[in-house]
Structures are given as structure tokens and as C-alpha cells.
Image (spheres, rainbow, N blue to C red):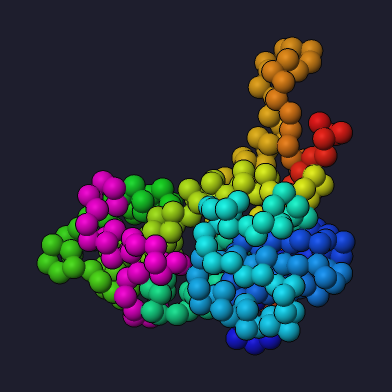
Amino acid sequence: MEGYHKPVLLQTIVEMLQAHQAKWLCDVTAGDGGHCEAFLEGMPSPGRVIAMDQDPQALARTRQRLDRFGDRLITVRGNFSHFSSLLPHAGRGQVDGILADLGVSTLQISDPAKGFMFSADGPLSMQMDPDSGLTAAEVVNTYEESQLADIIRTYGEERAWRRITGAIVKARRRNPITTTRQLAEIVLHTVHGPFSIKSCARVFQSLRIHVNRELERLEEFLPQAVQEMRPGARLAVLSYHSLEDRCVKNFMRDQAFPCVCPPRLPHCVCGARPTLKLVGKLIVPSQEEIAANPNARSARLRIAEKIQEAEQ
Ligand SMILES: C[S@@+](CC[C@H](N)C(=O)[O-])C[C@H]1O[C@@H](n2cnc3c(N)ncnc32)[C@H](O)[C@@H]1O
């Protein structure tokens, strides 16, 4: 349907999470409900989908869009970093598959009021959860120069981090930076030439990651996901930048290969047992999908399966 976020790698995810035989699937980043819809269509009735999101507007769109599924859809507002406690009692330890499609949806990005977009003017907010407290305006106006530099360098992977931070600090001495346009202009006046737009995108990305504590939340979520899955269940994580992907890759690898014995030992003596096994390799969207949905271009999908006790 037009007007909603276009779900990425939709068919692959439905197949990989084995929706056709699932009783409980959980989408912890429901967004506009694109993946949830495909899950509900692919699952045998009365299979249920738990749809979580920290953005109440996104969750309301999912509910409205998928109303026809009645109580087969359970919506839960909250941050997936509290996954275990948000999960309805009946789903605990029973989940057959979990999807985390990280980042922001097209509708969130293109809403100037949320302040994610540098090409339109709006308040410098960048909160996915409107009640989360910290805003990007607070970060750019009140953080020490070194803290700000760290955010832009680490989360934005921006080469001109030093110059951009200096320009922000200089500008805020004159006037507080409260809008997306003000911040974009500072970056565009600092970085010249063909890469200035990319620098702007990276600075905005870095602030968004910091404001929403995206990496910390992801690290908190992953072990809870494993805990709440039944043996044989699958976890699928779609990430859109290298820092997120590294976090997912390292987590899945550590769960799949936890042994810390020195390689010279003939067999394991540390006793660490794997909790996950990797399912296939990294999956990326096809060129056709990227042509039809440019937002899919940086997507990286990793899948792992919870190990049955007998396999350990
Ligand atoms: C890329 S969109 C998901 C789109 C969705 N798959 C669809 O088909 O419409 C990501 C969603 O995850 C939500 N989100 C991001 N981080 C979150 C977190 N830590 N806890 C809960 N929701 C989160 C955002 O609010 C956004 O709605």
C-alpha cells in the first residue's frame, strides 16, 4: 500500500523466520507494520504477531493498517531494550521468531517535526520516542566540544569531525542551534565540494544514534531475544550502518562460538556451550530491490537459530 514505509527483504525474512509454521512471531521494530502484515498473512491462524515500537505514532499506524487481523496482532509500546519485560506473558520463552529492523522508518525521517531530516526545517529533536528526554538540540548546545567531537567521529565516521565540531561550538556561542536547517547550514558552510551533503548526512546520523542510544539499546536487546526464543526459533536483524552490523555480527558469533580455550588444546575444557547457530551468511538486498527501494541500499541481514539442548 502507498504511503507506508517499504519493508526491506520482505520475502526473505518471512521465509527465514519460517512464518508458515510459527505460532508466535515478534517484530520489535514494527514501524508501519509492513513485515508484521506479511507475517500475519504467512502464519497459520491463529498464529500471533507481537508488534513493538517505541514510537507511539508508528504503532498506531500499524494497528490501524492491520486492524483486520483482530487479536492476532498484539501491539506493545516500548523500547526493545526492555524486551523481556514488555513481552506478553503467553509469549515468554515461546517465541518462534524475532525480527529487529533497526533505525528509522521513511515516515519518521520525512516528518520535519521529528528533526531527522537536514533537507527540511524542523526542531532539532531526533527522538524516536517522544518521551525519551534527550534531544539533538541539547547535545549540540550543551555538550563539551570533546564529547561532541567524539559523537561525530565515532557514530558518524565523519572525516571532517574536528572542523565541524569547531564550527558548531563557534556558532552556538552566538545563538543556540535549535533547528535542523541551522545545523545543516553550519555543516554545509564548513565542508565544501561534492561531499558536503554526505557530511551533513553523517553528522545527522551520529546525533540520531547518540540521542536514541541506538547501539546500547541493541546490545541490551540481543541477549533478551535469545532468552525468550524457544529452541529452534530464529532471530533476524536488519541493520543499516556498519556499527550496528558489527554489534550484531559479534554477538551472533560469540553465541555460536563461545569457547575460549587456547587453539592448541585438542578439545574444549572451558565448558562454554553455544546458544545460537548461524543461519547462512550475510544477506543483502538485490540490485532490483535497491532500484525499487533506494532505502534498502545499505541493509544487512543476519540470521541465527537458537540451539536445541541436544545439539549443545
Ligand atoms: C526501519 S523501521 C521498521 C519498519 C518496519 N519493518 C515496516 O515494515 O514498516 C524501524 C522502527 O523501529 C523503531 N525502533 C528503533 N529502535 C527501537 C528501539 N530501541 N525500541 C523500539 N523501537 C525501535 C523505530 O521507531 C521505527 O519505527
247 lies left or right of 50: left
Q: Position of residue 154 (x, y in %)?
A: 41, 48
Residue 234 visible, this angle: no
Nearer the observer, 149 or 133: 133
Give the farthest residue toward the left.
174
Give the farthest residue toward the bottom.
2
Residue drawn at point x = 29 percent, y = 48 percent? 147
Residue 6 visible, this angle: yes
In this picture, is 259 found above or below 291? Answer: above
Residue 138 sits in which quadrant?
A: bottom left
In this picture, is 192 found above or below 119? Answer: above
280 lies left or right of 131: right
Image quarter of the N terminus = bottom right
What main secondary structure does the magenta stretch of the protein show?
A: loop
Residue drawn at point x = 68 percent, y = 45 percent? 226
Q: Position of residue 196 (x, y in %)?
A: 38, 66
Residue range highlighted in magenta: 119-148
Residue drawn at point x = 56 percent, y = 79 percent? 60
In this picture, is 65 found above or below 236? Answer: below
Residue 41 sits in which quadrant?
A: bottom right
Nearer the observer, 185 or 243: 243
Image quarter of the C terminus = top right
Residue drawn at point x = 23 percent, y = 50 percent? 145
Q: Position of residue 97 (x, y in %)?
A: 75, 56
Check if residue 131 falls in the magenta segment. yes
Residue 190 sits in which quadrant?
A: bottom left
Check if residue 178 falls in the magenta segment. no
